[in-house]
Amino acid sequence: MNDTLMRQWAMLRAIPRHPQRVDAQTIHGRLDDLGISVSLRTVQRDLNTLATTFPLDFDESKPQGWCWRQGAGQLEIPSMDAHAALTFNLVEQYMQNLLPRSTLGHMAPWFEAAQGVAASQASTVTKWQDKLRVIPHSFNRIPTQIDPEIQATIYNGLLLERQLEVTYRALSNGKEAKTYPLHPLGLVVMEQVVYLVCTVKDYQDARFLAVHRIDAARLLDQDAIRPKQFDIDEFISREFGIRLGSQPLELVMRVRGILGKYLAETPVAHDQTMVTLDSEWTQVNATVPDTVQLRMWLRSMGTDAVVEAPLSLKEQLKAEYLELQRLYSTESSPEF
């Protein structure tokens, strides 16, 4: 009886949530990997038995695919404690704009279980929900919509290290979507957008695709090939920084007010130095990447930061501010 219980528990753990599915042959193989030796017929019989008690679903394909029914509650053994419940509560509350809606939907059973723990336990841990707030530094935007089946296929490709065939709509060229094979390497989330890092066809240079612009995805039988010199952290630094120049900049700027204290606490570079100029201004010197993000950050500080060097950056920002002054000085069109 104990062997049957352990086998069926292992089977339940091997069954994915909707919309992913797994067939009896695959479950049989996973049991074998765990040292549980039974016949395929026993696995099929167990699945039919478990489906009478648990919210399992199956399709009519060949081989038959099994999954936990959509909306099924989370089975927790051992049960979720207050610390885990707090973590899930915070993820649900503060990751809404960072995770795809399909991922949040997939996590719904855990969120519901956490809410149940918080409601049933008079724990000081769960009361942290009322004592903690996270304020985003940048302006929030509505997260992009990702097809859950496409997302599941991409995640499978990454986890199984298999090639994918995708149909992708590039935003820049305005052309029709193209279909091609690719080798998935990783995922990056930036400003509410999920990007798939990959190589395309037989090319060795990595690139990134916005997952919400993938119109179709199919898992291929071929193994994904990872470039020997690929490093995802180096790739992020190089590509997601949107570099404008290959060499770093020796930034010199004057800052005033509370900004000087803020930069003293959180430097922009390891070699940052600061010198007090007078009662109002502080000079900051730092070696920084030549990126779009640098310029966005400098613009965000307005009149509290003045770039002194390099001269090319100073002249660029000066020209932008003069153009802004011209635009704001121009009378609005009648329709406004």
Image (cartoon, grey):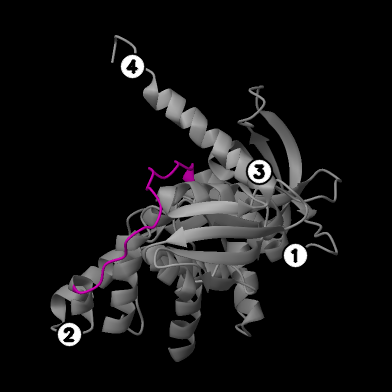
For disc 1, the marked residue is: 231
> Which is nearer the eye, 44 or 36?
36
| 7 w.r.t. 222: above or below | below
Which is more N-terminal, label 4 or label 3? 3
Q: Is residue 132 magenta?
A: yes
Residue 220, disc: none
Residue extent of the magenta highlight: 131-148
- Amino acid type, residue under disc 4 in the picture: Ser
Residue 268, image x, y percentages: 56, 66
- The tag earlier along the polypeptide, 1 or 4, is 1
Residue nearest the viewer, comparing 58 with 288: 288
Q: Residue at point 52% right, 47% down?
A: 296
User: How far is disc 1 from disc 3 in space, using C-alphas?
Assistant: 25 Å
Residue contact between numbered discs 3 and 4, judged by CB atoms under 8 Å: no
As drawn, the label of residue 123 is 2
Task: Residue at 72%, 58% (x, y): give it.
Answer: 248
Residue at mark 3: 218
Mark 4, residue position: 332
Q: Is residue 113 visible?
A: yes
Describe the element under mark 1 as helix, strand or loop: loop
Q: Are marks 1 and 4 in contact (CB under 8 Å)?
A: no
